[in-house]
Image (cartoon, rainbow, N blue to C red):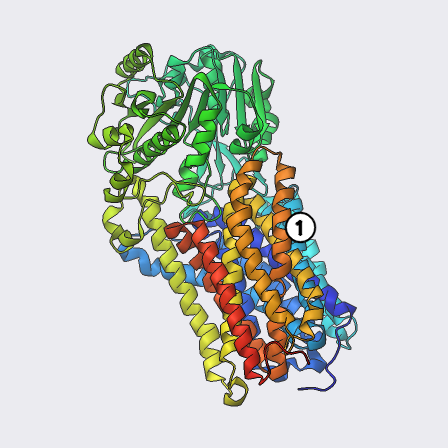
Amino acid sequence: MNDDPPRAGLGIYAGLILVTLTTLAYQLLLTRIFSVTMLYHYTFMAVSLTMFGLTVGAIVVYLRPQWFAPAAAARRMGLAAACFAVLIVLSFLVHLQMRFVPDMDIEDLPTHFWVLAFNYSLLALPFVAGGICVTIALTRFPRQVGSLYAADLIGAGLGCLLVAIGSRWISAPTLVLVAAQIAALGAICCLVKTGARRLRWLSFDVLVGLILLTAWNATPAGHAARILSPRWVKNRLEETPIYERWNAFSRVAVRKASTEPKGWGMSSRFRPKEPVRQLWLDIDASAGTVLTEFHGDPSRLDYLRYDVTNVVHYIRPDSSVLIIGSGGGRDVLTALHFRQPEIVGVEINDAILQTVNDDFGDFTGHLDRQPGVRFIHDEARSYLAQTDTPFDLIQISLIDTWAATAAGAYVLTENALYTSEAWQRMIHRLSDRGVISCSRWYGQNGPGEIYRLTGLAVTALRKLGIDDPRDHLMIVCRPDDPRDEGQPGLATLLASRKPFSASDVETIERAADQMAFEVLLSPHAASNEVLARLASGRNLEAFFREYPIDISPPTDDRPFFFDMLRLRDILTCYRMREDTMQPATDAFISLGLLLTAVFLLTVLCVIVPLGLSIKKAPLKGSLPLFFYFSSIGLGFMLVEIVLMQRLSIFLGHPIYSMTVVLFCLLLASGCGSYFSSVMVKDAVRGPRGPAALATLVAVLLLVGLAAIPQLARFDGETTPVRVAIACGMLLPLGLVMGIGFPLGMRVASHRSSDLTPWLFGINGAMSVCGSVLAVILSLCFGITVVLLVGVACYLSAWFSFVWARQYQGLPTGTSP
């Protein structure tokens, strides 16, 4: 080992911060892009391909050490950072032009796999260059590994802030160009103190070119060219929308719609009397809502009476109404038509609110200015926890319907409205005459959503002390429409705080008869044995176990309403692909294909090169180090994704969760890495290293078993307060999690400097697989189980650390 290793200057630190800032910013932006160009269940793939690219970059440094000698470290970092900037733009532009193939028929699986693998490899290329840059910094300046690793993590945390703040004003594709500019600036910083004048000027040219491209894209000519707009979305050719807005949540696009009145569950007896001017507003090219022309006369909206989603208004006139997910305002218009005196629309997506009430306010009639109407920008559970106002009617009309159909693996998109805890809160906010109206798809061959929704309502009612939930439930269905073969039936479940009266039942039955609807469940009758058994509330646990699909009520620990496949059914899921089971089976198939692709690419690009280049002497006795870096790589990713999942429920939206978790964990881990220099100095011999890892395991257990369960107590706080509470929980956790990597690197470099890139690659490879494994485990066993597996990984790291120090021939508890 070199007796006098080089020291990193200020330019190296600045370059490293800017490169890692770009890395995390681009990763977050890809989650936003994937939800438009591909499917929701691939958004978390951005985490996996980021780690994969960084890992391959580390392997390149390991395999070609002569290219990355310490004397040339700054120059090579600058070159890698410049390549990072260029590859971001090139790979991203190619991805925007590609067609994704999500069909899950058996004959299409090979095509789907290769398209997925190509996309994965293409978008991982920039991260390979970024990984080379980061690996050089962390392995060629061993005396400063703690502070450099801190700079690495702090830069990544700042990348989260860039996306969170920038997304309010700049579209995601444009932010990709901004991220590439930052990488080019990082290249210049790395090259400042080197003699590589041509390379420095080349990096400057790249920066200027990216700035000009961004400026041109903002001009009318650049906007018309749409070079930064996806050509294919959700496997269909994108038509130019008449309006488009991006934010941190979604892309909102407005398109022309037919003049035939639009409804989700229109009666077969409805006959349009006059055309209705409408616009179609889609969210991420899948979930949709309608903007309706309105000039203040609710009587012209008579067609809304024929929609099964609105039957609750027949039995609850003169009510205070809470609409969860106000969207384009259709449910607000319905409440106005039924002359409801007080209407509150809660919408989490501020881009939708601005589109409906501001940008298209003249078209929609400025619903926010209508007497008795209020719009609230908040997450529904958070709002319900904050308000003391009782409501006579809470309406949930197909929230997340098409988004859920595209949601698949759910890690970043699952809605927390469909859990037992959420429904208990909603029932608590009902007045004595209050009713929850919730509409979901209902197909004769696939009624799983309504069955699960019924079980959810029954469980919530029983937990609130209602022994006979049957008297509190009614379900009305619009059967499959023969005029639209692709449209399944739609059912609306009504759940009341008090038993439905005979008058309520009679009114619903009369309305159903007039509209050709079917009453599937009432206090006196049920259309099938399943609904009757569910509504009884008796011995449901055994019934849930025996039923062919999983219709048990979701909880906050397993908030996956649309996942109805059990682990034992995965191999036979093709037999269950009917109607509402389609999203669940597609999700598991997609996860299986992605896990296969990730595993094969990891083997080909990481394991095989390492195996072919093994030098027996340096690797002798390195097995405990292999286990150590594998454990902390897998453990960090499992814990990170668990926290994203759980805090998504607490903070109200996945983008809040991802931003807060990544920012806090990375920033705190950076600080932990920096302050670990005291422990790193005696990591080879002293007792502080094992003690620090034991503290990490204890803090993880404390957070998982004590802190996370207490989050529900603060659901009623405002969003800033909930963010502050989440940060208070995450910061100490990140502080101790940041210690593990520099501790292991110190022990590894004491043995052989040639080992460090190899171990960095192993750490990254386990993180790549861990990102997919975390999703599968949470789907099958719940979020808490994944956290406990993460704790077990860090416990394994503690044993491996002690084992590794014994290989040095030193007592584990002695001081030097």
Asked whether residue 205 appears in the rendered view, the answer is no
Q: Horizontal placement of 67 versus 279: left or right?
A: right
Front residue of 276/332: it is 332
Q: Quadrant of the C terminus?
A: bottom right
Looking at the image, which residue is at 37% across and 24% down?
A: 495
Q: Is residue 736 above or below residue 499?
A: below
Asked whether residue 456 appears in the rendered view, the answer is yes
Q: Position of residue 162 (x, y in %)?
A: 66, 50
Front residue of 564/19: it is 564
- Badge 1 density bin: few <14, some 14–19, many ≥20, Cα 10 Å: many
Q: Which residue is mark 1?
A: 162
Q: Quadrant of the N terminus?
A: bottom right
Q: Horizontal placement of 7 versus 741: left or right?
A: right
Q: Is residue 151 above or below residue 663?
A: below
Q: Position of residue 188 (x, y in %)?
A: 74, 66
Tell me the quarter of the picture where residue 601 sits: bottom left
Q: Position of residue 185 (x, y in %)?
A: 72, 62
Mark 1: secondary structure: helix
Looking at the image, which residue is at 64% across and 47% down?
A: 728
Q: Is residue 512 above or below residue 449?
A: above
Looking at the image, which residue is at 40% across and 64% down?
A: 597
Front residue of 424/248: it is 424
Q: Horizontal placement of 762 versus 515: left or right?
A: right
